[in-house]
Image (cartoon, rainbow, N blue to C red):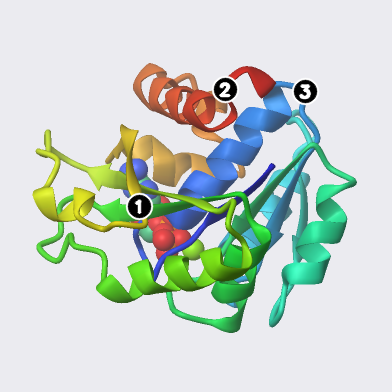
């Protein structure tokens, strides 16, 4: 399956979720490829730190810019799972990745006032579905510091459903990122539990 972490805002946790899911899959013995399409290189730099250690399950990562469609579809026949990390803006990478993917997760930072994803993101999904009718799109509350009520505005976006999982704000996400680890490798029960729940929501019995 091709999973895309995308959206039109930066700092919403896309790269953090992408790398944590790929580490979760690698630890489950699943062949996963992380594709970094963001010039900020957050996921690639994470993998560079991870590769300096020999004690961790290997995660493959490539970088691809511009039109990523052919690369993504070609590589999806060679890996069990593909996870794409896209930058936080409307771009050729985001649009072509949406056409190549089966599932889009759009994390929204839960404690910021402009929680509402733009109507434009909804239009991008609609556009992508014209070419890729199987694309499913879900909103995911992330970096949540308090118990947030599900906002009505979220469920009003017609092209999206809402994930039943919420990613909370825990320091271990930042610490793990700088160590080249996933939170599942950090002995943190709370963060491990939510990443595992998210992985099971996405991969179900396939992982
Ligand atoms: N659940 C979380 N709890 C705490 N900090 C987080 C969490 N998710 C992300 N962060 C931090 O927030 C910042 C932005 O996260 P990042 O994943 O790079 O966002 P994006 O890829 O959407 O731009 C980073 O400093 C990251 O360490
Ligand atoms: Mg990022």
Disc 2 crowd, CA 10 A, few/some/many (<14, 14-19, 20+): few
Instruction: Please tell me in which quadrant of the rendered image residue 71 appears.
Output: bottom right
Residue 29 image label: 3
Q: Earlier in the sequence, mark 2 or mark 1?
A: 1
Residue at the image point whose x is 58% and y is 57% from the top:
133
Q: Nearer the viewer, mark 1 or mark 3?
A: 1
Please give the residue where the numbered disc 1 appears in the rendered image: 160
Instruction: Please tell me in which quadrant of the rendered image residue 180 appears.
Output: top right
SS type, badge 2: helix
In the image: residue 18, left or right of residue 125? right
Give how far across and how far down residue 100 sits, in percent.
68, 62
In the image: residue 83, left or right of residue 154? right
* Contact? badges 3 and 2 (CB < 8 Å): no
Q: Distance between the Cα atoms at labels 1 and 3?
A: 31 Å
Q: Note whether residue 153 is visible.
A: yes
SS type, badge 3: loop
| 190 in relation to 85, above or below | above
Q: Earlier in the sequence, mark 3 or mark 2?
A: 3
| 152 in relation to 99, above or below | above
Q: Distance between the Cα atoms at labels 2 and 1?
A: 19 Å
Q: Nearer the viewer, residue 31 or 97?
A: 97
Q: Quadrant of ligand 1?
A: bottom left
* Contact? badges 1 and 3 (CB < 8 Å): no
Residue 73 image label: none
Please give the residue where the numbered disc 2 appears in the rendered image: 204
Q: Earlier in the sequence, mark 1 or mark 3?
A: 3
Mark 3 vs ligand 1: CB below 8 Å = no
């Amino acid at each position: 399956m091709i999973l895309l972490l995308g959206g039109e805002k930066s700092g919403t946790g896309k790269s953090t979720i992408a790398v944590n899911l790929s580490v979760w899959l690698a630890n489950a013995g699943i062949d996963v490829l992380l594709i970094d399409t963001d010039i900020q290189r957050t996921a690639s730099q994470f993998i560079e730190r991870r590769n300096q250690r020999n004690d961790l399950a290997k995660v493959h990562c490539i970088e691809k810019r511009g039109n990523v469609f052919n690369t993504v579809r070609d590589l999806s026949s060679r890996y069990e799972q593909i996870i794409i990390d896209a930058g936080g803006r409307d771009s050729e990478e985001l649009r072509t990745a949406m056409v190549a993917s089966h599932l889009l997760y759009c994390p929204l930072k839960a404690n910021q006032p402009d929680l509402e994803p733009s109507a434009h993101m909804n239009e991008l999904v609609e556009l992508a579905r014209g070419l890729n009718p199987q694309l499913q799109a879900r909103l995911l509350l992330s970096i949540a510091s308090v118990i947030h009520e599900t906002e009505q505005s979220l469920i009003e976006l017609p092209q999206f459903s809402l994930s039943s999982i919420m990613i909370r704000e825990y320091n271990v996400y930042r610490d793990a990122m700088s160590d080249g680890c996933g939170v599942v490798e950090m002995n943190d029960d709370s963060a491990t539990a939510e990443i595992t729940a998210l992985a099971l929501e996405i991969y179900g019995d396939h992982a």
